[in-house]
Image (cartoon, rainbow, N blue to C red):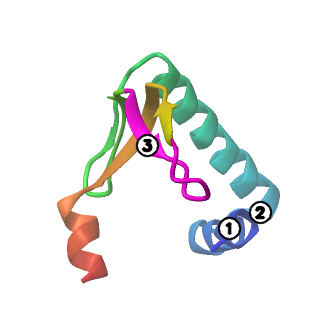
Amino acid sequence: MNKAELIDAMAGDANLTKADAKRALDAFIGATTGALKKGDRVALVGFGSFSVAKRAARTGRNPKTNAPIQIPAKKVVKFKAGSELSDRVK
């Protein structure tokens, strides 16, 4: 499902116009991004939680030349599914 299909589904399920659903989705993405940038955790009970984790620097291999390369440390976004979401997907 891409963003346009998600907007269509949200509009249909919530009885919203597509424009309202797009604004709601954009607001959710903006608020979540802002919270994660500050280092906060975003938890949606039953759905899951978004958090930021630090990935340490490490040595990798260039698959083409097999030469070792340094991969720098960075922050990554993690999502952990909630129990209700996991149960519904099973």
Q: Mark 2 points at which residue?
A: 17
Q: Which of marks 2 and 1 is nearer the N terminus?
A: 1
Q: What element carries label 3?
A: strand
Vertical side of 3 occupied by 31: above or below:
above
Q: Which of marks 3 and 2 is nearer the N terminus?
A: 2
Between 19 and 61, the one nearer to me in the picture: 61
Q: Which amino acid does label 2 sit on?
A: Thr
Does residue 33 belong to the magenta stretch? Answer: no
Q: Is mark 1 on a helix, strand or loop?
A: helix
**Badge count:** 3
Label 2 with label 1: CB-CB less than 8 Å:
yes
- Disc 3 crowd rating (10 Å Cα; few below 14, some 14-19, many 20+) is few
**Magenta part of the protein: which range?**
57-67
Does residue 60 belong to the magenta stretch? Answer: yes
Q: Name the residue under label 1.
A: 11
Q: What residue type is labelled 1?
A: Ala
Q: Position of residue 7 (x, y in %)?
A: 69, 64
Q: In the image, which disc is placed on residue 60?
A: 3
